[in-house]
Image (cartoon, grey):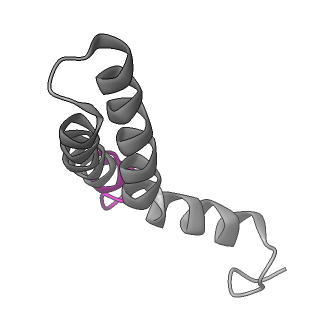
Amino acid sequence: MSAGAPFSPRRRRDDLVNALPALGMVLGAALGALVGLLRGVGGPVTLGGAGIAVGLVLGLLVRAFLTRPGS
């Protein structure tokens, strides 16, 4: 099966790695809002926004690490 096939293992891995920044943003927003609701410090909207930023940066860093040449 070639790497261009829609359900090949390599294609799934590439798609998952490319989705890491978006997944980080969603998880960061959810966790930030949850912490804001439970702790009451900063509020859920503020911490949700901060979680989006942190999740994006972490997702980009992990994606860069996993897609570096030679891996």
Residue 60 image-quadrant placement: bottom left
Which of the pair 41/32 is nearer the observer?
41
In the rendered structure, which segment of residues is drawn in magenta?
A: 62-71
Q: Residue at x 29, y 34 (%)?
A: 44
From the top left corner, tell me how far across and down residue 32 is, in percent.
32, 32
Note whether 13 is above or below 24 in the view shown.
below
Q: Is residue 11 magenta?
A: no
Which of the pair 29/58 is nearer the observer?
29
Q: Residue at x 36, y 40 (%)?
A: 28
Note whether 69 is above or below 41 in the view shown.
below
**Residue at the bottom extreme, as displayed:** 4
Residue 27 image-quadrant placement: top left
One can see residue 16 in this view:
yes
Q: Residue at x 36, y 57 (%)?
A: 21
Which of the pair 20/27 is nearer the observer?
27
From the top left corner, tell me how far across and down residue 48 is, in percent.
29, 41
Which of the pair 56/46 is nearer the observer?
46
